[in-house]
Every structure is written in C-alpha cells, then in structure tokens.
Amino acid sequence: ARNRESVPEKKLQKNRPDVPDFDFKGLEFRYMGQIFDCFLLCEKAGTLYIIDQHASQERFFYNSFLEEKDNIQPLLLPFYLNEECDVREMIEKNIPLYEEIGIFIKKDESGALYIDAMPTSFFELKNDVLELIVSQQGNIENIKTELYARAACKKSIKSGDRIDYDKAVEL
C-alpha cells in the first residue's frame, strides 16, 4: 500500500470521479470497487483495504442477532426430536435453557419431544438446532454462539455474488 505522500489526493480523486467518499463512524473511506465478486476495495489515507464481502456481512448479521431479541415464531409443523433415551432425558432437563435463546421444546401426549417455536433466523437451521442440542449437552452459550454463526453465514452474501455500490458501502 502507498502512503498519502506518494499519491496526491487530487490524483486519487481524478482516477475515480464516479466513486464518492463515504464516512463510516467518523472515518473517511473511499470505496473503489469489487474484485473477483468476492472482495471490496476501499482506500483510507493512502492505504488500500481489501474486505471479504461474505465475512463482513456475516459479522454484521451475527452482531445484529446478539444485540436484538429475534422474532420467535411458532412452527407450522412441529419438528420432532427423535433421540435415544439418555439424550432425550438431557434435552428435557435443559428445556428452560433452550427457552432462553427462543427454542421452545414441548412434549406431546405420547411423550415425544418436539420444537414448537424458535427464532425466525433459525428456521433454515432445524437440523443444526437438533445436532447442537445433542452435541453440546446443555451448554447454552455454545449452542447460541454456533447457531447465530451458522444463521449469519447462511444469510450472508456468498463469494461470487455481485453487489451494487450501496450494498458495498453498507458492508
């Protein structure tokens, strides 16, 4: 990367007059474009920044899941947890913990366990929810962290996706 003295500001602006500067939390950045449909190029004070568009948006979604209560919705069809007896007992014991992150597990008249409601961000992750409930054995922080990370990844822009200027500046 070049420092500001080696590339005069006027020359930088002249090369890309169609790309305005933008201010991010008080820091002046200049968006320069997207390369390989994967990375965003930005310049600040003569330094070039290469930003992974997927990782950037994934971090944004992950943080937004942590900061706000997700919209918990009942499932149209219950998601049954067909687990062995010892795992089933562990799940039953930890139902109050799962409710803390919005996963509501109920028991039907036959005694079978099912997920009745969950945050909308987890809808695409039903199998992941079950896998983590079983593998993490009641460790609610690990389950929450992993589910939010997986939900953020699935929701984010993928490598190879072209994005417009406004979306790039947002990232």
Image (spheres, helix red, strand yellow):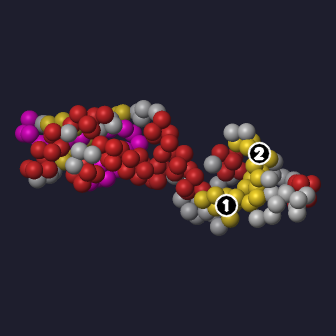
* Residue at numbered disc 2: 28
What's the mark number on residue 11?
A: none
Judge left or right: residue 135 versus residue 3: left
| 39 relative to 99, above or below | below
Q: Quadrant of residue 55?
A: bottom right
* Residue at numbered disc 1: 50
| 95 relative to 52, above or below | above
Q: Quadrant of residue 22?
A: top right
| Among numbered discs 2 and 1, the one appearing first in the sequence | 2
Q: Position of residue 93 (x, y in %)?
A: 15, 39
Q: Is residue 78 visible?
A: no
User: Which residue type carries mark 2?
Assistant: Glu
Judge left or right: residue 41 versus residue 85: right
Which residue corresponds to the image point at 58% horizontal and 64% vertical from the top-left? Answer: 160
Residue 84 or 136: which is nearer the viewer?
136
Q: Residues within 10 Å of mark 2 (few under 14, many from 20)?
A: few
The residue segment tinted magenta is 109-131
Judge left or right: residue 52 versus residue 152: right
Q: Position of residue 89 (x, y in %)?
A: 11, 44
> Disc 2 to disc 1, how far (Cα)?
15 Å
